Image (tube, rainbow, N blue to C red):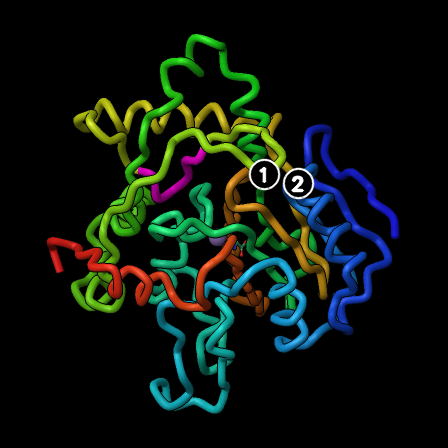
Amino acid sequence: MELRQLHDLFAAELIGADLTAPPSAELTQQVEEAMQRYGVLVIRGADITDAQQKTFSRAFGPLELPSRSPSPQQHGSARAFDPDIFHAGNLGPDGKIVPYASEKAALAKGAERFHTDSSFHSMPTKWSLLRGVLVPPLSAGGDTLFSDARAAWDDLPPEKQREIEGLIGLHDFWEGRRLAGLKGKVTPEMFRIAPFPMVKHPLVRSMPGGRKTLFIGGHCIGIEGMDNPAGLTLVEELYAHATQDKYIYRHKWQPHDLVIWDNRGTMHAATPLTSDEWPRDMRRTTVNESGPETSARRWMDERGFVNPAA
Ligand code: OGA
Ligand code: MN
């Protein structure tokens, strides 16, 4: 197997891995090491099934399950989504393209703001693994951007690092969606399905291996002990810093790419696919560092996290 770096700072392609069989101890180790160094790992030609993606993912940690997965019964369609897999892209449960400008696609546009998956969860995720099953032509849009939040931390002036280390970030799914431009589009029905409460995470985290990283992203909407707008202003300042071009790798999808990213050390953002001509079928597994295989919703419900607005 061979590694080819894709960006000056981070991101690499792993060449020669077979994902159709359960990963050997050697492959697992190699992927762990590459992830620690590069933060984003691309494996091309991963023409695998949902079950194979889950088996591969579970070698790195327990799956975080979607909080709600549309079932064919609910939607009166024949297309079953695997309930353990998150669906990105532009297909509805009936397998048809959901028009980009439609109300139904509005919530998904939150992913166009840089974020780390499930930072609205009290237990932060380890990695996400996204497989492009159907992807649009290279120039049509729908690229995914990744930013190296570890390098962004490294480059902060020491006095800024001292100022922010030890602060606690506030992460709120719905506030984050409002900031991503969905103000007024969040319906009570959407909220009822996923009434995530605000949760707290350190603003500066330590990665396995010792590097530090800025843990911000789309769901981070303030700082504990600071009023907004001051807290939000600081978050936005760090966000602007960490999403400068120099920290960004743009992934142009080819069919059967599997892209793995570390949700602790990187952020990512979808780019718009405004044409409704191309199906984009993207399937994501997410793994946690530890814990049972359960959803964010269930995990928090069982531990008494309550959204006061619910
Ligand atoms: C995700 C995500 C971006 C994209 O699946 O978590 O943010 O480009 N996807 O599909
Ligand atoms: Mn995401």
Residue 304 rendering spot, x and y as whole percentages: 20, 59
**Which quadrant holds residue 277?**
bottom right
Magenta span: chief secondary structure: loop
Label 1 CA crowd tier, 10 Å (few <14, some 14–19, many 20+) = few
* 303, 231: nearer the viewer: 303
Question: On the image, numbered disc 1 is attached to which residue?
Answer: 208
* 92, 66: nearer the viewer: 66
Compared to residue 117, the image places residue 216 above or below, namely: above
The question of residue 98 being in magenta is answered with no
Task: Residue lying at the far top in this picture: please name it.
Answer: 159
Specify start and end residues of the magenta stretch as a single range: 215-220
CB atoms of marks 2 and 1 within 8 Å = yes
Q: Is residue 254 left or right of residue 88?
A: right
The question of residue 217 being in magenta is answered with yes
Q: Secondary structure at mark 1?
A: loop
Question: On the image, numbered disc 2 is attached to which residue?
Answer: 36
> What's the amino acid at mark 1?
Pro
Residue 212 rendering spot, x and y as whole percentages: 53, 28
> What's the amino acid at mark 2?
Gln
The residue sitting at 55% across, 63% down in the picture is 284
Can residue 103 be seen here? The reply is no
Q: Is residue 11 left or right of residue 290?
A: right
Q: Is mark 1 within 8 Å of ligand 2?
A: no
Compared to residue 264, the image places residue 282 above or below, namely: below
**Which quadrant holds residue 145?**
top right
Inter-mark Cα distance, 2 to 1? 7 Å
